[in-house]
Image (cartoon, helix red, strand yellow):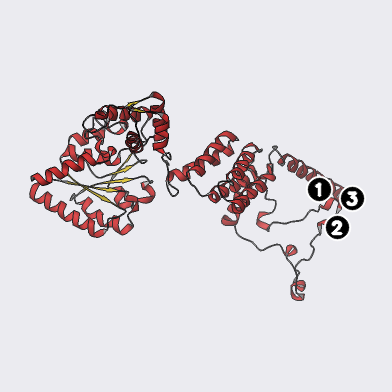
Amino acid sequence: MDMFEANRQRLLSQRAPLADRMRPRSLDELVGQEHLIGPDTLLRKAIEQDQVSSLILWGPPGSGKTTLARIIAGTTRSRFVQLSAVSAGVADLRREVKEAADQLGMHEQRTILFIDEIHRFNKAQQDAILPYVEDGTIVLIGATTENPSFEVNAPLLSRSRVLVLQALGDEAIRSLIQRTLEDRERGLGTRNLTMDEGALDLLVNLANGDARFALNTMELAAVGVDERGGIDTDLVRESAAVRAAGYDRAGDAHYDTISALHKSIRGSDPHASLYWLARMLERGDDPLFVARRLVRAASEDIGLADPQALQVAMAAQQAIHFIGMPEGALALAEAAVYLATAPKSNALYAAYGEAVNDVRDTRNEPIPIHLRNAPTELMAELGYGEDYRYAHDYPDALVEQQHMPDNLRGRRYFTPTDRGYEREIQQRLREWREILLKRRRETSDGETDE
């Protein structure tokens, strides 16, 4: 390396973002992920013995996916090439594969091809990598925040080991912050900064397990430090601006969060329901997406135990259309709390599911002829509607009549619970059965007397 290049590298190193400068360079420096790279783990042994095969690193932002890939390359003395699936194409892949083949043939040096956000590659791009993973030309390490089961092609997935990285724990983030304050070579140690305990606790909390967010916030806070050299809570809050999102609107955590909201409503917990609702809305989620789930919960988990629940959920959806956000958030909050505190029943949900199964799994026999309309003379001549019993012509508007196809005659789906309004439905159905049974007995007695 000539003097010019050495100087350029030195300047780049000095001006690199704090998060990049503080990136761990060895397994011992890496904080968190002890379940993967702790002492005596299989992955650590494979790295130290240069026996690493292709990997898919799945974890949230700032959990150390890129860092781990770089450490693996450094420990195994492999050539490290990094591509972003956002900007790289098939031509870039082929160029890097050719270079990897040359390095392997001439210098017997393996290449680790690190593809960040591999879930953004389409099928053709992922297929283009596959032959070179199979023949060992490259060791692929893909990083993704999305579930690889859905986002990575099955052939590529089957030739890679999926490693699940976890968001860093509070103690890991805390130790990283303290190391940054003390490190005079790569960190902020030459600034002699102090950070009070409240500011440290706040930053750990706001980081939400994201090391990059913590370091980026510290770097900005250091700019705003006055002559006292202290970072306090106000400075941390201002530097953080917006807490790390924790999920994007198309990712797994998006669906995990709406699931948590739905299950909190089902579990009759208004407090958790409000929390998960706020977490989604404050992260910029689509309020209509949330409203649709509230409508579903009203039908699926409350049903006729409280028929008003569906009306409340639909009213919240209309409120969002009418006034929008952020004001509409209160309508969604009202609906969420109403649903959470309403009596619960999945009787309607279960009943409809059984009806659907019968439609799918049994013979769809003709509609009983007495239930059919007869709008034409021909239909009337064919017997359509003949012998139909008009319920309002009978006492209590009740009449015994077959309403199901012959093969499902007597089939029952809806069994109301004794919760909420369904208790009244249960009682009403019981009374109707008793009335019809009494009539049947009276008719039978009359026939016997004759």
The numbered mark, 2 or 3, whose residue comes first in the sequence reads 2
Q: Are marks 2 and 1 in contact (CB under 8 Å)?
A: no
Residue labelled with disc 3: 446
Amino acid type assigned to the residue bearing label 1 in the image: Leu
Residue labelled with disc 2: 393
Q: Name the front one of labels 2 and 1.
A: 2
The residues tagged by marks 3 and 1 sit, at their Cα atoms, a distance apart of 15 Å
Front in this rendered view, residue 240 or 384: 240
Classify 10 Å Cα crowding around label 2: few (below 14), some (14-19), many (20 and above): few
The numbered mark, 2 or 1, whose residue comes first in the sequence reads 2
Residue 241, image quadrant: top left
Element class at badge 1: helix
Q: Is residue 19 left or right of residue 356?
A: left
Q: Is residue 13 left or right of residue 441?
A: left
Residue labelled with disc 1: 436
Q: Is residue 196 visible?
A: yes
Amino acid type assigned to the residue bearing label 2 in the image: Asp
Element class at badge 2: helix
Residue 1, image quadrant: top left
Classify 10 Å Cα crowding around label 3: few (below 14), some (14-19), many (20 and above): few
The numbered mark, 3 or 1, whose residue comes first in the sequence reads 1
Front in this rendered view, residue 47 or 281: 281
424, above or below 289, in the image: above
Front in this rendered view, residue 302 or 417: 302
Amino acid type assigned to the residue bearing label 3 in the image: Gly
Residue 68 at x, y percent in the picture: 26, 38
Residue 407, image quadrant: bottom right
The residues tagged by marks 2 and 3 sit, at their Cα atoms, a distance apart of 21 Å
